[in-house]
Image (cartoon, rainbow, N blue to C red):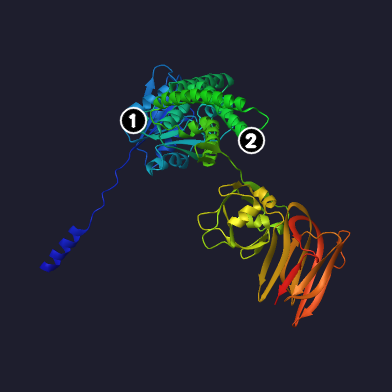
Amino acid sequence: MYWFFVILTFLLAGIKTQKPKKYQKVSVIIPAYNEEETVAKVVKVVKKVSFVDEIIVVNDGSSDNTAEEAEKAGAIVITHEINKGKGQALHTGYKEAECDIIAFIDADIYNLTSKKVEAMIMPILEGKAEITKTKFARESGRVTELTAKPLLNFFFPEINFEQPLSGQFAARKEVLKRINFETDYGVDVGIVIDADVLGISILEVDIGAIQHDMSPLSDLNLMANEVVRTIINRANKYGRVTMIDDIGYYIRMAIVGLSLVILGLFTIFFVRFVPLEIAVIITIIGIIIALYYIIKVVVQSIVMFRKTPGGNLVRSFIKIHFPMIISIVILLLMISTFIGAAHFDNGVLSVEPNSRNLIIYADNSQSANTISARGPYTIDAAIENESTQIRMPSDAMVTLGVSINDTISIDGEEYTINETRPGEPDVLRLPIDAKKALDVETGSVIQNSRLKEIFEGSGVIHNYYGENTTVSEDYIITSRDKVSGIYEVVIDNASVVTSHGIFKDNASYEINVNGELMDTITYVNQTFDKNVSEFTYGGHDIRITFEKTNSTSIKQFLRQDQNTFMNIYL
């Protein structure tokens, strides 16, 4: 028995006891001015909430029995001898409250329930937010829609609550110490703005429908004035007027300067009819204007950030500065493009920017990629021991209609097409003889649209590989796209290849199988003499169909007097 108690003692000592969570007390502050009909009901509803420790009704100079009704319902009552306003009433209650979490609830709510109160306070107890504000369905809201929201969107665009003037709040007492309480109806929006600027987390909680007395027009006018005054004062205090007014003007002028720089650089490199001197002057003026106003923007932005204690200004700052940021990004991209196109050779600095070509095919049959950006390509020397090979980027192959292992004939010399080397996506490597024949030099930059002109007249043997079958077509590259015809090769009821190219009028085209002439197709008056060529070879049924299309091509098939148009190898 003795050893049993010893072991039990050691086991109990080894168990780590979890420190109990600190209890958080909750106070509810109810500001009331002549609310004898409803204040007791509100107090009784709040008392039903199990975690509420204290209920304080601030009787703000009422002339009816508000104080008596609140005391009967069980609330602590603090009375202002004269009406000081809702904000002052909230501040009085907040100062007197001794709890960790404080909720503010209006005294004129007819359909308040304990669930609504719990929904407002629980997120703070659970650590989801430091302040909660409510949103709810109600008939009124004219001040919110006509004054509060437009002004907040203008000066504080990062604040995006459905009901910034809801009136019902809950918060940790420690964060309320950092809030400047307005003495009037501006208190609600003032808390929202201060919390946002100071970086205090706010959560908007939906508590359902709320019913209370509709305010008369005279009260709405007073409320609107106080809300507007509060927002404007906060905008001045936190530098938002400067951000919208002064910084907005500086940003617009900075964009003008950046636009002039972009215009000047574009004119220097791409607009021939504008004299170089004028383009340079435009660029210099733009640089001066842009630098001057960007410095202004930076200085004023620093001042504005210093006025914002919590620094929670990023979203508004980005929204205001976004146009200028985009202009700077565009300019930097242009400058980087020009720097990348700079060449220094023999004491001469030259900048030759080249753009990529955007290729958009309406007909999917023309390319596997219906939309692609291609080029430009830089000419380089062939790799050692590759004097009969041309290494070509895949985009260039698509443009010329060739593939890896195809044969291309340039000025009577035949070369094999190979893929470009890793890390050289836009490098076109040509042997010395090929460069001479094509009249290009190492280091030349070729736009995708010029490839057809450079390789014009070159012959190509293009191969399509199937199962135990190869179909090869012979064509000449032409720089001018022309209307093409399309053909399909079907062997033993299986489609092997579908391709298109230019058939010249009044010309015949040979079809060979394993080097033997099997048929001839004639293209007369822009139509084929027969649309189907059928024959059998080595036990294989071969069917080739021809059709005219509206698509264009740079592949001009070889006529009978030039060579064989199609070779099928079985």
User: What amino acid is found at the position of numbered circle 2 in the picture?
Assistant: Phe
- Per the image, label 2 sits on a secondary structure element best described as helix
Rendered position, 344 above or below 460? above
Q: The N terminus is located in which quarter? A: bottom left
Q: Is residue 499 left or right of residue 333?
A: right
The kind of residue on which mark 1 rests is Ala
Q: Earlier in the sequence, mark 2 or mark 1?
A: 1
What residue is drawn where x is 26% and y is 52%?
Answer: 18
Residue at which label 1 appears? 97
Give how far across and how far down residue 531 sits, in percent: 84, 67
Q: Position of residue 163 (x, y in %)?
A: 53, 33
Does residue 180 appear left or right of residue 563 in this picture? left
- List the single residue furthest toward the bottom: 539
Residue 20 in percent (x, y) is at 27, 48
Task: Please say if 52 is above or below 76.
Answer: below
Residue 545 x, y percent position in the rendering: 80, 68
Circle 2 crowding by C-alpha within 10 Å: few under 14, some 14–19, many from 20: few
